Amino acid sequence: QKEVEQDPGPLSVPEGAIVSLNCTYSNSAFQYFMWYRQYSRKGPELLMYTYSSGNKEDGRFTAQVDKSSKYISLFIRDSQPSDSATYLCAMSPNTGGFKTIFGAGTRLFVKA
Amino acid sequence: NAGVTQTPKFQVLKTGQSMTLQCAQDMNHNSMYWYRQDPGMGLRLIYYSASEGTTDKGEVPNGYNVSRLNKREFSLRLESAAPSQTSVYFCASRAGGNSPLHFGNGTRLTVT
């Protein structure tokens, strides 16, 4: 069983829809939670970075962490065609970046 | 501000050939990392360097060697390439503490 599970999709939505992307994990030691966006033939770019449980909002993006359920989510409001990309969740304990574990990524298509 | 720069962008090797992937960062980060990304597998850590002068194995180090040339540069070497090493290779860096990873745009390697 993988430490981090993420539905690979693809997920196809119309422009303007609310998108929900999710990951589950098994290691209760994870404290830092990240979402990366990866466009085709590019490197992952950091989108959201949160510590422990709770919500964090940045523009159209909201990250949620529920440590009791070992479940994290990324919501995208008013989705745009430019949001079409692969979204990777990542998480680490508080001991450094070499322990960062990535999900396999969910591919999102936003249709105009 | 270039961030993390990887060269080359693409490479095709024959089985048994050797090559070195180059990575440089201009963010004055202490730690640097090499990952490989394969479909359905997520990003897997090959080697990392927590600081200049140190290197350590990650999850999938077999068949690879690394050199932390200075604070800016971290290279990955394949001594005798195998078809199983066909992948996209990403270099990343981070400042330290629990700061997030910053990625380059990858090297796409095919071994025939």
Image (cartoon, rainbow, N blue to C red):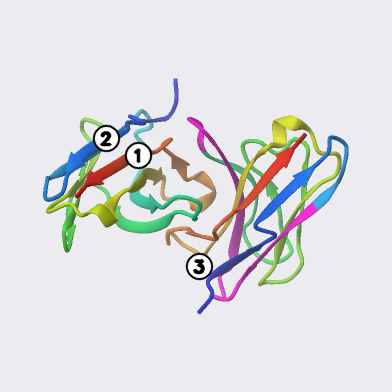
Q: Position of residue A98 (x, y in %)?
A: 54, 49
- In the rendered image, is residue A66 in sight? no
* Residue under pointer 3: B95
Q: Which residue is mark 1?
A: A107
Q: Pointer 1: residues within 10 angstroms few (<14), some, or many (20+)?
A: many
Residue pointed to by mark 2: A11
Which sits in the foreground, A64 or A109? Answer: A109
Residue B67 within the magenta-colored segment of the rendering: no
In the picture, which quadrant includes the C terminus of chain B? top right
Could you tell me how far apart the alpha carbons at marks 2 and 1 are, in whole angstroms?
A: 6 Å
Label 2: chain letter: A
Separation of residues labelled 3 and 1 (CA atoms): 29 Å
Verify CB contact (< 8 Å) between mark 2 and mark 1.
yes
| Residue range (magenta) | B20-42
List x then y, in percent, for residue B50: 62, 58
Q: Is residue A11 above or below residue A42?
A: above
- Amino acid beneath label 1: Arg
* Vertical side of B65 occupied by A2: above or below: above
User: Which numbered disc, 3 or 1, marks the residue closer to the eye?
Assistant: 1
Distance of label 3 from label 2 (alpha carbons): 34 Å
Whether the residues at callouts 3 and 1 have beta carbons within 8 Å, the answer is: no
Q: Chain of mark 3?
A: B
Give me the residue at 16% from left, 58% from top: A60
Position of A60 with respect to A9 (left or right) is left
- Residue type, numbered disc 3: Ala
